[in-house]
Amino acid sequence: MTPVELSRTVLRAVRRAVDDGELSVVVPERVVVERPRPGGCGDYSTNVALQLAGPAGRPPRHVAELLSRRLADSPGIAGVEVTGPGFLNLTLADDDPAVLVREILAQGGRYGCGDVLAGQRFEIHIPYEVRAEVVAESLGRILATQGAEARVVHGEPPEPGAAHVVNLRPVPAPCDPAALGRDASRWALLLPAAHDRPRIGDEHLAQREGNPLFRVRYAYARTRALTRNAAALGFAAEPGDVRDNDKATGSGDAGSAQANAAAPLHAALSAHPRTLTLAATHHAPDRLARHLVVVADALLGFQHTVLPQGEEKPSAAHRARLALAEAAGAVLAGGLSLLGIDAPEHL
């Protein structure tokens, strides 16, 4: 279980306690988990009980004990211990190194969807302006990934009973971006934060490394090419250990190098659910666009390890690396779809 997944597990425990009437608090947007400090125990620790105690009108340790009972039966958690004034110390069950890849491949474009905003309705109020239109459209799709409903409104007063009104006023584009074409123009409008003026220029069309859109789309195309090339070599993706078994010992050998090459990609994929949550709660599709660049760069730094080289035969490690690459492809395609941008099979 990754720290992001653990944080979501703790947050779900808090939400269930609130839904069941055991706690009367506003569910936080996120829960921080970190490695225990000296003298602590378990794999991770969180002070969420101390944060909730005041609003709940309960002693911190009482809140911690309440949450510990809910966490003890959660998948991936082997043990929970309450220490000090109310810290939750979490011990993880032995984790399959491929669990994240299996989850992504099973969920595909649904990976990262959650229920943080379940049941909430949003009215996105925008002016008649092209950038506002594009940002609002993407934001509506991102809100839906977190369980919310959204509608875009132009110059109308808020609908009676609307729970959340979002007044979206991104800095307008300096000129008409239509000349860039659909995909490049959307990227140019979505990548900068709302308070930054977008650049509308031919740099978004350049087929080179300095263009972030090119890197993201090229990275996705590479994942598809790797799958095709692997099929030609007679093997397919299978989640597992990305290290060759005969190279997986020691700290400076080839096995460690393979694991190190995979680590940034694994971390980027693990962060995708939190990125979607933050993009939704902060009404900021630009967070997702920038995250896709991180995923793409990590994939491009890892891709050279996927296929056998020279006289090397396909191994379990190659199948595992291909599965990791395909998981990255699923995240890239899903993210681009939320932004309304095509993910090309060939580039």
Image (spheres, rainbow, N blue to C red):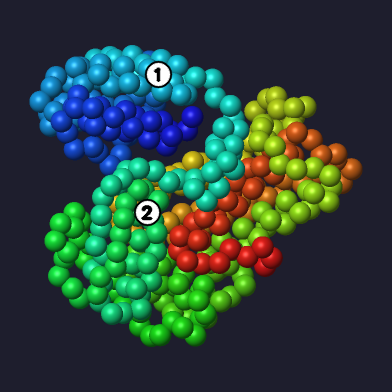
Mark 1 residue element: loop
Judging depth in this view, the residue of 276 and 140 nearest the camera is 140
Judging depth in this view, the residue of 266 and 80 nearest the camera is 80
14 over 293 or under it: above or below: above
Mark 2 residue element: helix
Q: Is residue 94 left or right of residue 324?
A: left
- Any part of residue 197 in sight: no
Q: Which residue is mark 1?
A: 73
Q: Quadrant of the C terminus?
A: bottom right
Q: Residues within 10 Å of mark 1 (few under 14, many from 20)?
A: few
- Amino acid type at circle 1 is Asp
Mark 1 touches mark 2? (CB < 8 Å): no
Q: What residue lies at 25% left-to-right and 58% top-to-bottom?
A: 122
**Residue 18, image quadrant:** top left
Q: Which residue is mark 2?
A: 144
Q: Residues within 10 Å of mark 2 (few under 14, many from 20)?
A: many
Q: What residue lies at 30% left-to-right and 39% top-to-bottom?
A: 30
x, y percent for residue 72: 37, 17
Residue 211 disc label: none
